[in-house]
Amino acid sequence: MSVTRQEFRDAMARLGAAVNIVTTDGPAGLGGLTVSAVCSVTDDPPTLLVCLNRGSPQNRLFKDNGVLCVNSLAPGQEELSGRFAGRSAEADMTERFSHASWGLLETGSPVLDGAAVSFDCRIAEVVERGTHSVIFAEVVAVRQGAASRGLIWFSRDYHAIGAG
């Protein structure tokens, strides 16, 4: 018995995940997209796993820049998440970034002001698997935001979690 693509997608909708805007900037250009497939790999060296769809035009941009920042969103940033997920008419990346305030840490990737936490990373390795690039990203800087609540995606909708 095999699991169909739709069965798998429906089951994954019940696996809650943090909502992140993953950004990059460098010689290949500015980029950013909404990603829920992010997790910790190890704390020595601090490393995250980030999955990017291989069909995304931004996939190559991240790999060519060799850096990224995972910005984990807080409640109230749902609209920004939608913009970076491509659910708006804005095709221009500069326009997407204009809807929030951004800073920098070590790599030059945009760091979202007001994020619950931001992980600034250098790409250490990329594994191609099925429809996605699995990126192992070594964390070189962290900025913890003031938000005491986080934002997750569960059952195809946003949900606030945490104290408050």
Image (cartoon, grey):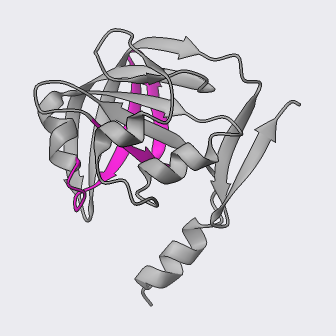
Q: Which residues are magenta?
A: 31-58
123 lies above or below 130? above
- In depth, the one of 139 and 164 nearer the eye is 164
**Residue 154, quarter of the rendered image:** bottom right
Say if residue 25 shows up in the picture.
Answer: yes
Return the residue found at the far bottom: 1
In reply to whether residue 134 is colored magenta, the answer given is no
Q: Position of residue 80 (x, y in %)?
A: 54, 44
Q: Position of residue 75 (x, y in %)?
A: 71, 39
91 displayed left or right of 20: left
87 lies above or below 71? below
Q: Position of residue 78 (x, y in %)?
A: 62, 47
At 42% from the left and 33% from the top, the residue drawn is 98
At 15% from the left and 45% from the top, the residue drawn is 60
Question: In which quadrant will I find the C terminus?
Answer: top right
In reply to whether residue 32 is colored magenta, the answer given is yes
Say if residue 18 shows up in the picture.
Answer: no
**Residue 94, quarter of the rendered image:** top left
Label tally: 0
